[in-house]
Image (tube, rainbow, N blue to C red):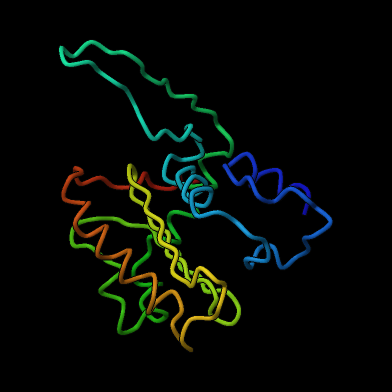
Amino acid sequence: IEDTIKLAQKMGITTLNDISRYGLSLVLGGGEIKLIDLVNAYAVFSQEGIKHNQKIILKIEDFSGKIIESTTDQAVKVIDSQYTKLITDILSDGEARKPLYQNSFNLTTFEGRQVALKTGTSNDYIDAWTIGYTPNLVVGVWAGNNNNAPMQKQAGSILAALPIWNSFINKTLNNFPVEFFNDIEKE
């Protein structure tokens, strides 16, 4: 558990601070995580093990184009790329995904594009998540009630978060070149 939490923290998770609160259920979502942290962690998968610092503003220019302030990337390797490629291979396998998503499968695929995807729903339908990525774009969606009340029964990730995620990424992908994940190296 301790090693898992340390790795999660290296990947950008900031909320798993009290190790005594977690057990084996942590891998099934037994810990509270912020959406921005989860997106940051999945970005490590999309970047084959490299964590980049999150930035809201890249640079500020004055009216003449002179840069007033800018940020620099602080890239750090946090996990071996071979492991991230395995995870990406699994999460981007549309055929493996098809039985789970059934009638919503079309919301998980994009013609001519490779997209990795993970959904999740907490107990009692309180939270629904969809996180998906390409080599250069990571999008996360949370659906739920702000008062922590359960959503309507069966309003889990496939019915609540996935359609929102799909709508956003469907429009956004057009702004990015077609890219593919690097293959897993064969031994």
Q: In this rendering, would 14 be left or right of 172? A: right
Q: Is residue 31 above or below residue 68?
A: below
Q: Position of residue 113 (x, y in %)?
A: 23, 55
Q: In this rendering, would 23 be left or right of 144? A: right
Question: Is 112 or 19 nearer to us in this picture?
Answer: 19
Residue pictured at 55% horizontal, 71% vertical:
147
Q: Is residue 146 above or below residue 186?
A: below
Outermost residue toward the bottom in this view: 153
Q: Position of residue 167 (x, y in %)?
A: 24, 64
Q: Position of residue 157 (x, y in %)?
A: 44, 74
Question: Is 129 or 82 nearer to us in this picture?
Answer: 129
Q: Residue 110: name its quadrant.
A: bottom left
Question: Is 114 or 168 nearer to us in this picture?
Answer: 168
Residue pictured at 52% horizontal, 52% vertical:
38
Q: In this rendering, would 45 be left or right of 163? A: right
Q: Position of residue 182 (x, y in %)?
A: 36, 44
